[in-house]
Image (cartoon, rainbow, N blue to C red):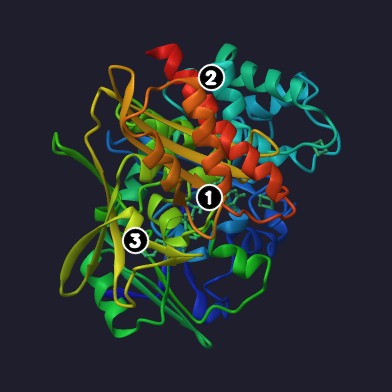
């Protein structure tokens, strides 16, 4: 069954949007859609590329325990059909209660009480990030509050008073609000939407947009129309619309396929559905794969990680894709499927060149498989960037080491930002095997790393810095592993 009408909840009611009738391209972002209406101008555009958070809105869905989950996202990176089956909350929905009162929501009141706003351009975005934070089941610590606000920039007020407002509203004075009162109704509405959710197929002018709900249907579309641009979270793809103003003709949105969002553990490996968001991974895999989660701690912002998927980071095959070195270190395998069946490739073979992969035109990335880790092995990840938060890597590393009698018996040294693709420092790896894990050996290996790679100079850094930093990351790894062993 296919449908061409997007259904989502807005202001407490199920809204139906027929893009064809409205002559709205399916690549219209939620931000632009909102701002076309005089009633929704509270959501602001600062950058249109996921950096400032002025466009933050909250999406609610039903979580696995049957309660509502609240997620802050950047509406400038979200296409309208991606709202299908969800509730959209904007700053206009924030108020104390539904009895028609104009009183401020406790979050807004906290911003006022703590002097958390001046020009106010950023404030709606902060308030929406705080709403998602306040609805988390666990009371946030200061670190969690800071992390939740990483994706919101303020150029006037400074962050201290905003953080104070967050602490006041999300911890000390947390109180029930209109959304809590309406939760049962919202859950019912979401269930109704779910029952009627079919494959979306939208045609507006020359644009076709598919959002299937099953993997089989997605594979069939990919087989029949291999020129479809596939996407999951759209945090890479949407920039082609918002920054390069490209008209994308055929799109296959994998975001509606539940079976691509599962994390399964069979005791020998963990199979991560390609459309699992990075924030979900970060919240669920820390114990088993800490180095991956540490990399995710400094990946974009919470708004970005709540959209961005593991399949998308791998599919982009960027030389500075942050999960890639650490996935190499964990020896990840990539599962690919087409209508004929599935195959698996080690990630090393999957990434073939600058933004190039072994993916065939009729295939999709369906999962990433992480083998169980050997408790004797040490795996670490490193990211060097100009800013700690919300910045892309200058150089990154994913390292794995097995020591026996203080001698390296197995080692992987994978680097991002040093070549056209994520690559291992093979000469240093070969040199280190069988050698004592001591400073002189490490310094010699660092020199081999510097001579193997010929990195680029670009706006982020000069080649010389990159070479130096890559070698120094090995020294840092040695320092940390030596302290531990
Ligand atoms: C503000 C901002 C900050 C960012 N920060 C970082 C950062 O710190 N580190 C970093 O590495 N990246 C960063 N990125 C880039 C981006 O968020 C990541 O690459 C992200 O993982 C992409 O995932 P996605 O699901 O959004 O990808 P999408 O945009 O949906 O897709 C990206 C590519 O992968 C392909 N693809 C997606 N899913 C599949 C699939 N299942 N099968 C086949 N192909 C597929 C698509 O065809 C497309 O080419 C940032 C982006 C923004 C906008
Ligand atoms: S407008 Fe800046 S993050 Fe969306
Ligand atoms: S109050 Fe002006 S940008 Fe934050």
In space, the residues marked 1 and 2 are separated at their CA atoms by: 58 Å
State the residue lying farthest toward the bottom.
206
209 left or right of 116 in image: left
Instruction: Point out the frontmost of discs 1 and 3.
Output: 1
Say which of 456 and 381 sits in front: 456
Which disc is residue 175 wearing? Answer: 2
Looking at the image, which is closer to me, 51 or 200?
A: 51
Q: Which quadrant does the C terminus fall into?
A: top left
Marking on residue 452: 1
The x, y position of residue 144, in whole percent, is 54, 23
Tell whether circle 1 marks a residue whose Cβ is less than 8 angstroms from ligand 1.
no
Q: Is residue 356 left or right of residue 50?
A: left
**Residue 417 location (% of width, % of height):** 57, 50
Judging depth in this view, the residue of 381 and 453 nearest the camera is 453
For residue 280, what is the image quadrant? top left
The numbered mark, 1 or 2, whose residue comes first in the sequence reads 2
Q: Are marks 2 and 3 in contact (CB under 8 Å)?
A: no
Residue located at (73% from left, 38% from top): 153
- Mark with earlier residue (1, 3): 3
Q: Is residue 382 visible?
A: no
Badge number at residue 156: none
Instruction: Look at the numbered disc 3 and give the secondary structure of its residue.
Output: helix
Q: Is residue 432 visible?
A: yes
Instruction: Identify residue for label 3.
Output: 350
Q: Is residue 110 left or right of residue 180?
A: right
- In this rendering, the answer to whether 358 lies above or below 110 is below
Label 2 Cα neighbours within 10 Å, binned few <14 / some 14-19 / many ≥20: few
């Amino acid at each position: 069954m296919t449908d061409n009408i997007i259904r989502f909840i807005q202001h407490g009611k199920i809204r139906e949007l027929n893009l064809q009738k409205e002559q709205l391209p399916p690549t219209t972002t939620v931000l632009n859609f909102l701002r076309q209406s005089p009633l929704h101008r509270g959501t602001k555009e600062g950058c249109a590329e996921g950096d400032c958070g002025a466009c933050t809105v909250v999406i609610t869905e039903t979580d696995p325990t049957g309660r509502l989950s609240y997620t802050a996202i950047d509406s400038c990176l979200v296409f309208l059909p991606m709202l299908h089956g969800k509730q959209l909350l904007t700053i206009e929905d924030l108020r104390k209660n539904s009895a028609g009162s104009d009183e401020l929501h406790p979050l807004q009141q906290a911003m006022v009480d703590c002097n958390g706003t001046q020009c106010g351009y950023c404030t709606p975005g902060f308030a929406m990030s705080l709403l998602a934070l306040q609805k988390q089941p666990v009371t946030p610590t200061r670190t969690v509050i800071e992390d939740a606000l990483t994706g919101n920039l303020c150029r006037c007020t400074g962050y201290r008073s905003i953080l104070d407002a967050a602490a006041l509203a999300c911890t000390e004075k947390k109180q029930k609000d209109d959304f809590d009162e309406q939760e049962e109704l919202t859950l019912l509405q979401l269930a109704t939407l779910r029952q009627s959710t079919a494959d979306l197929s939208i045609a507006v002018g020359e644009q076709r947009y598919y959002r299937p709900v099953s993997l089989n249907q997605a594979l069939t579309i990919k087989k029949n129309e291999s020129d479809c641009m596939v996407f999951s979270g759209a945090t890479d793809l949407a920039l082609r619309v918002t920054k390069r103003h490209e008209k994308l003709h055929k799109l296959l949105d994998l975001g509606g396929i539940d079976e691509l969002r599962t994390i399964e553990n069979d005791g020998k490996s963990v199979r991560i559905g390609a459309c699992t968001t990075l924030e979900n991974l970060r919240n669920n895999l820390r114990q088993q794969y800490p180095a991956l989660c540490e990399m995710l701690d400094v990946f974009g912002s919470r708004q970005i990680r709540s959209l961005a998927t593991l399949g998308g980071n791998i599919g982009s095959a960027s030389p500075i894709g942050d999960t890639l070195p650490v996935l190499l270190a964990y020896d990840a395998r990539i599962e690919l499927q087409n209508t004929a069946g599935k195959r698996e490739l080690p990630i090393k073979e999957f990434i073939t060149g600058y933004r190039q992969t072994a993916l065939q035109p009729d295939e999709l990335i369906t999962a990433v498989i992480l083998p169980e880790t050997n408790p004797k092995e040490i795996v670490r990840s490193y990211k060097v960037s100009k800013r700690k938060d919300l910045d892309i890597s200058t150089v990154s590393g994913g390292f794995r080491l097995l020591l026996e009698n203080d001698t390296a018996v197995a080692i992987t040294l994978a680097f991002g930002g040093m070549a056209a693709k994520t690559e291992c420092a093979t000469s240093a790896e070969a040199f280190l095997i069988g050698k004592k894990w001591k400073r002189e050996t490490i310094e010699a290996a660092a020199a081999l790393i510097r001579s193997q790679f010929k990195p680029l100079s670009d706006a982020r850094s000069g080649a010389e810095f990159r070479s130096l930093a890559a070698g120094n990351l090995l020294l840092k790894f040695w320092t940390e592993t030596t302290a531990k062993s």
